[in-house]
Image (spheres, rainbow, N blue to C red):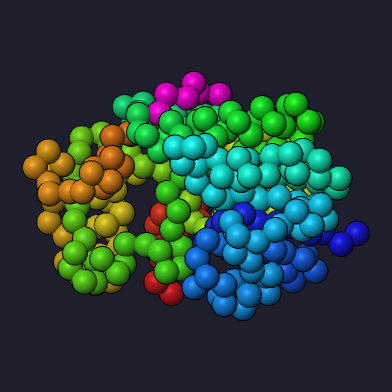
């Protein structure tokens, strides 16, 4: 059988998955809101389309798999708002993947959370994600759709990481007591999604993160050491000059468990710690 994926918001993570699927003969259509992104998406071997603005109903009707990487806004999830009826009626869908965020858990003071932890987001972005997850789950329940939710940690990988800021001298080690973040290399996101595609379990939720939640200042320091550059000076969070967006990332602290992707999907992370991932990126 030929598999066909419609990928909404075909960005960094979706492109990493496409690198795994295209050699296996998959047909992938990827949407973007920005026409400037079309050539790069096409160059990957993906059929790039502008959306909103292009009728994708025919593509959706022929899709076996659906990936949603589009962020919700104040009006809700853009894909659901525009296409919920067509998704519900799609005749051959075998798998739907919704890329969410660990921000749905909110602040837990550095304690561990897992997929069964109650959702108590502290940020507006986290609250929008909780609602979007619920809306997707509602549609899936009503129409018996094969929905899988993936809560992604902070994403890094080729072209995304702390090295550029450390090299330019703009990196700062913001210190906030008991502040812990979880991360995930983009290649490991692709491995998790591929494992779920190969062993779908409709309704399941997966945390997608590595084994080593750590303070952000440790990651900056490690990157500097890899580069052979001085470790940036420490700056206290309370007095640091930060944008509201940057400060919001420090509003929540938690350690995220990833046992389910290993036990249920059999995933073996290629980069189980940020040290592994950053060292590989340097090479």
Q: Where is residue 178 drawn, in percent x and y? A: 26, 34
**Image height check: is 63 above or below 118?**
below
Q: Is residue 244 visible?
A: yes
Picture residue at 50% right of the left edge, 42% below the top: 72
What stretch of residues is rendered in magenta?
A: 116-121
Q: Of residues 272 and 71, which is closer to you in this image?
A: 71
Picture residue at 72% right of the left edge, 64% below the top: 28
Can residue 203 be found in the magenta stretch?
no
Q: Quadrant of residue 90?
A: top right
Which quadrant does the N terminus fall into? bottom right
Q: Residue extending furthest top?
A: 118
Q: Of residues 73 and 15, which is closer to you in this image?
A: 73
**Image height check: is 136 above or below 49?**
above
Q: Quadrant of residue 262?
A: top right
Q: Is residue 16 visible?
A: no
Prevailing secondary structure of the magenta residues = loop
């Amino acid at each position: 059988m030929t598999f066909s994926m419609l990928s909404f918001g075909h960005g960094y993570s979706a492109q990493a998955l496409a690198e795994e699927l295209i050699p296996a003969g998959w047909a992938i259509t990827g949407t973007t809101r920005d026409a400037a992104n079309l050539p790069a998406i096409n160059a990957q071997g993906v059929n790039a389309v502008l959306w909103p603005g292009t009728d994708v109903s025919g593509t959706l009707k022929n899709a076996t798999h659906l990936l949603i990487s589009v962020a919700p806004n104040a009006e809700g999830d853009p894909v659901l708002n525009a296409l919920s009826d067509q998704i519900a009626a799609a005749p051959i869908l075998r798998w739907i993947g919704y890329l969410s965020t660990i921000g749905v858990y909110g602040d837990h003071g550095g304690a561990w959370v897992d997929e069964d932890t109650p959702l108590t987001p502290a940020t507006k972005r986290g609250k929008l994600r909780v609602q979007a997850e619920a809306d997707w789950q509602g549609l899936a329940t009503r129409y018996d759709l094969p929905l899988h939710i993936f809560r992604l940690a902070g994403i890094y990988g080729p072209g995304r990481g702390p090295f550029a800021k450390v090299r330019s001298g703009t990196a700062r080690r913001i210190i906030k007591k008991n502040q812990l973040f979880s991360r995930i290399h983009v290649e490991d996101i692709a491995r998790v999604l591929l494992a779920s595609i190969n062993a779908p379990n409709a309704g399941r939720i997966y945390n997608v993160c590595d084994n080593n939640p750590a303070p952000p200042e440790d990651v900056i320091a490690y990157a500097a050491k890899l580069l052979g550059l001085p470790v940036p000076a420490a700056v206290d969070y309370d007095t640091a000059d930060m944008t509201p967006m940057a400060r919001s990332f420090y509003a929540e602290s938690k350690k995220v468990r990833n046992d389910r992707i290993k036990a249920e999907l059999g995933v073996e992370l290629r980069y189980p710690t940020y040290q592994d991932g950053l060292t590989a990126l340097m090479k």
